[in-house]
Image (tube, rainbow, N blue to C red):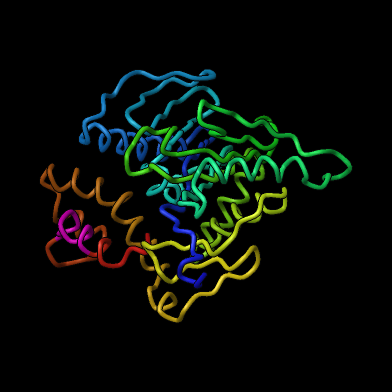
Amino acid sequence: MSAHQNRILCKEVSIDYITATSACGPTTRNLCAFAKWLVSQEVQEGCRARPWSNTGYRGTVAGSIAYGVSQQGGIVRASNQVSREHWGQLLSLADNVTRLDLQVTLRPLAGTTATLRRHHRELLKAPRQRGKPIKFKVYYGPDGPEGIHIGRRVSDRFGRVYDKGLESGLPEYQGYLRYEVELHRKVAYGMAQFLDSQELDQRAMLHYVHTFFTVRGLSTSGTWHIPMDPAVFLHGAQDCELPPAVNRSRPEVVKALRWLHNSVRPCVERLTALGLAEEVQRALGVHSEIRMAHQFPDVLEKESVH
């Protein structure tokens, strides 16, 4: 079998869920103001905004974003597309991250059911960790295994592998497995900070998810490949090779532009609509006409590594 034929196709590598919190004060106002804007974007996409409450927090939820405030401060929970695109901004506005989910969605060479069945056998034979057997649960359906949970949900690290096509019911995920690692408390915050410091955060996510499962006995044959960014590869469980083209993509610039687009643009648009365009220009130290709402999407589409 050639190297190309032995390549496992990765559909997605991303942050799939984030819970960000803040203490009372300016941090809460800024975090919730950004979350309110995210809610408005979900509403524009057709989602319905409705009241939301959880563990003493009260606020609003729409689509994949929820936020609330309490005497403790503020909380924001984002998932799916929202967390994938905005986790960095939420981290920068928050005081803490209490949950962070990393996911890799790929099409296994042997198919989803056969791969999950193989993982079940591997877990049964997996070596003990710190003298204890690995805790796991395998969920079977009428046609075979559909998902596996590894570890305990209440621990700092919890893993799951499941048939994304069955779980979502969406045709674009048919034949794909999702490998997901759920992090909590200090581990979640530390990982979020680490990923934010990386110029190639997708590579770091891919490596961490791959390592989490391989050290627990699950084998991966072939190479995990991300077609949306052909420069990102993971060879086995160890090495990540990046051709020079990736280093010329200026990811730090992309992150800065994304932050301007998501965090600054809404404020500029609001003030400009109030007739304060000149004041905005003076505050920003620019003298040309502000066209952020029209220019930034074009720049991001051309420059984004995601």
Q: Against 49, is 92 above or below? A: below
Residue 5 on image: x %, y %: 46, 66
Residue nearer the viewer, 63 or 28: 63
Q: Main secondary structure of the magenta part?
A: helix
Which residue is found at the position 51% from the left and 31% from the top? 143
Q: 235 left or right of 75?
A: right
Which residue is found at the position 36% from the left and 26% from the top? 61
On the rendered image, what quadrant is the C terminus found in? bottom left
Residue nearer the viewer, 125 or 217: 125
Residue 129 on image: x %, y %: 82, 45
Q: 49 left or right of 231?
A: left
Which residue is found at the position 54% from the left and 19% from the top? 55
Rendering quarter of residue 64: top left
89 in magenta: no
Which residue is found at the position 26% from the left and 28% from the top? 47
Highlighted magenta segment, given as a residue range: 290-298
Q: Against 147, is 304 above or below? A: below
Q: Against 220, is 2 above or below? A: below
Tag count: 0
Residue nearer the viewer, 195 or 162: 162
292 in magenta: yes
Rendering quarter of residue 240: bottom right
Q: 249 left or right of 102?
A: left
Residue 116 on image: x %, y %: 58, 41
Residue 226 on image: x %, y %: 43, 61
